[in-house]
Every structure is written in C-alpha cells, then in structure tokens.
Amino acid sequence: MILGIDLRCLPPGGTPGTGIAHASREITKALFALSSGHPNLTLSLYIPREAAQEHGKEIFRNMSSGKCRIIKLNSATGGSLRQSLEAYGCDVLFVPSGAVAPGIKIPVVPWVHDVAIFDHPEWFPESLFRRAITTNLFRKGIRKAGHVLCVSQFTKDELVKKFQLDPSTVRVTLEGGDPELASLHDEALAQAKQKARYRLAERGVTRPFILYLGTLEPRKNLPMLLKAWDEARSEFKRPTDLVIAGRDGWKLDAISSSLVDAQRGRTDTQSRLHRIEAPTDEHRRDLLLAAELVALPSFYEGFGLVALEAMQAGTAVLSSTGGALPEVVGDASPCLPPDDLRAWKQSLLELMDSEQKRADVARQGKMRSTKMGWEIAANVILDVLTDRAV
C-alpha cells in the first residue's frame, strides 16, 4: 500500500508556519514511524519544491526506519499535485490540511481542524470573493471524500451538522502536542522548568508571568485577556507579568490598541507586559515550562494545541469554553465563558495568588495529557486510510 500525504500546507523557506503546518509535520512523522511496523506500507509525501528541503529534514530527523519517498511539486497548486499523482501515484491520499484539491481521482481522506470560517467569516482576512471560492471547494472536498478525520468531537459535531455527514464516516483523532514536553516527568520536569526560567531571565523575563501563546488574530480574544490582567495587576500579591508570544496575524487594530492601553502609564516596578514575536520551538518550550499560568481566552478552537502543550509542560491552564477547549482540558482546568471579564479577572487573581491551586491544576493537566499523543492519532488515521485504500 502506498499512502500519499498532501503537504502543500507547509510554508516555503523552511519557516515553521502556524498550527495546521505544525500538526501536519508531526502527524507525518508519526505515520512515518508507524510505517516501520507495516512491511507493505510506503509513504509518498507530496511537498512543494520550495518547502521540501527544510521540512523534509524536520520530518525525518532522528528517524532510522520506515519507507518513504518525497515527491517535489513545482508549486502548491492543485494542478501541480494532480500532475504528480499521475506520475507518482498512491492508493489513498491523506490531506492533513483538510483542504482537498479538486479533480483528485483516487480515494482522499481530509483531516479537518476547524470550520470556524463558516460561522464567523469576520475573524478571517480573506476577501468575500476569495472566501466564497475556498469555502465552496472545502465543502465539495468534504462531501466527496466519503470518510473524514477531525481533531476533536466538537469539530466532528460541527461537520455533521453543517454538511449533513453520516456520523459513522467521521473519526476523531485528537492531536499530540509536543513529544519533548510530554516525555518530561517528576525530577526531569522540575529541572527543565528551572533551566527554562534561567534562559528566559537572560531575555528579560525575570518575574512570575501569565502566558498567552499563539497567533494574534480576532478569534483568540486577546483584548479581553489584556483587560482582565490590566484590572487585576494592581491586586496581585506580587508583580505578575503577562507575556504575549506569537506572530502577528490579521485584523490587528483592536489587539494593537489593547496592547498599547496595557502598556500606558506603567513603571518597571509594576507588573509588565512582554511582547515576543515568532518564538522558535525551543523558545516556545521555555515559555510553556517557565510560565506559572497559560491563559487561553479564545472564542473558538477546533482543538486547542497550546492547552495540551501547556499540560504536557506541567503548567496550570486557564481556558475559555470556546470550541473544543473544554474537551481538551477536561476536568483538569477551569473553563470560563470567553466574554466574562469579571470571571477572568477573579480567576487570574485566585490562581496566581495560590501556589497550591496552580500546582493542583498543573498536576491534573499533566495526567490528562498522557491520554493524547501523535502516535495515538496516527494509529486512528492509519486505520481509516487502510480501509479506504482497499
């Protein structure tokens, strides 16, 4: 069996990209690792030429077994993919971005991360014309696929409702987070946290801090978090910084205004706001390990990868009830309505002022995180793909 993977979502130049690109790389690595135990399984990766070299190194790093070939596409277009499939075919095509190219003649299985754009187009930067094209193609691809994979039960319910899919044809995989953080336990975790604090101190983050990690975009609800922290910081028992880490996204006017308001009229002796743009994977791990609390106030998440990574890092999480976040954190973390400013301010104060409460939330989160992993997701995916290839 030749399993094709459509990796046109990987950005050129070796840049890491956002959540879908990250998830696509990680699930490809997990599928490659599984292929060593399946003698009749070969992977065929379809990657745009400009992205192939660096992402190929990342996917195969530390991998000594498995069978795979890389097909370099001339471009990231559907036409280039179709040409390569004709020349270098496969039995079934897995599309980890969820966006199925039209005109594919072999069985295709998309992996859907969210469908937020259908209910909240105002959160996204596309023009009305562009959005009409992409959503129409997505809808056709999902319905043609026959079988669909998705990252959460929440996303499955959305798919079934919006596209009238048979629930038996939609499988939930969950996601895997950060394997390096997941491997840390007990003394090794404590040492990693201490080293991360030292490294961040060298970058100027020297005090206890709350962390927001992710792309800056409207659905992440950052203005509310900034307001809640701003109102709470004079009431914290000790100075408590807020770190906003992630690349700039789109429709930033309200977010930028909130960042300016949170900085205005403050001195270095008070709680401070730090803005860290485009952190590397190593820097992300340091932030997740060193933070005392990770705050995720999103209006909507198709999964909530940062919540899982924070739990793997043994760090307390405070999340919203938006989308799949309650599904990811379960009973391990408090979940608040994303628009309840008063509740967020109070919870920030309660958690940051109580080491015991944070430790309890962190411990429960670490235990819950062990139920999710890329190998677990890859096994579900491979099971569906094998059935589709028959």
Image (tube, rainbow, N blue to C red):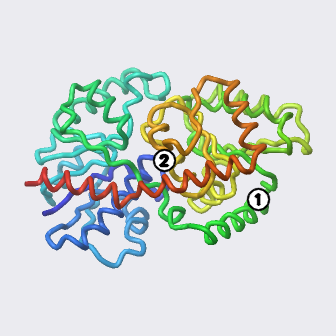
Q: Calculate the distance from the C-alpha at mark 2 to the C-alpha at mark 1.
A: 25 Å
From the viewer's perspective, tell me whether residue 323 is left or right of residue 203. Answer: left
Find residue 354 and report its image quarter.
top right
Against 330, is 191 above or below?
below
Amino acid type at mark 1 = Arg
Label placed on residue 203: 1
The residue at which mark 2 appears reads as 305
Q: Which residue is pictured at 45% across the width and 32% down the height?
A: 323
Judging depth in this view, the residue of 90 and 77 nearest the camera is 90
Judging depth in this view, the residue of 375 and 59 nearest the camera is 375
Pick out the residue farthest to the left.
390
Q: Of helix, strand and loop, which one carries label 1?
A: loop
In the rendering, at what x and y percent does residue 230 appear? 78, 32
Q: Which residue is pictured at 13% across the width and 52% down the height?
A: 387
Against 192, is 252 above or below?
above
Circle nearer the viewer, 2 or 1: 2
Q: Of helix, strand and loop, which one carries label 2?
A: helix
Q: Residues within 10 Å of mark 1 (few under 14, many from 20)?
A: few
In the rendering, at what x and y percent does residue 62 appear? 42, 75
In the rendering, at what x and y percent does residue 213 appear? 60, 45
Judging depth in this view, the residue of 266 and 164 nearest the camera is 164
Q: Which residue is pictured at 28% across the width and 25% down the height?
A: 161
Q: Which residue is pictured at 67% across the width and 53% down the height?
A: 359
In the rendering, at what x and y percent does residue 389 appear? 11, 54
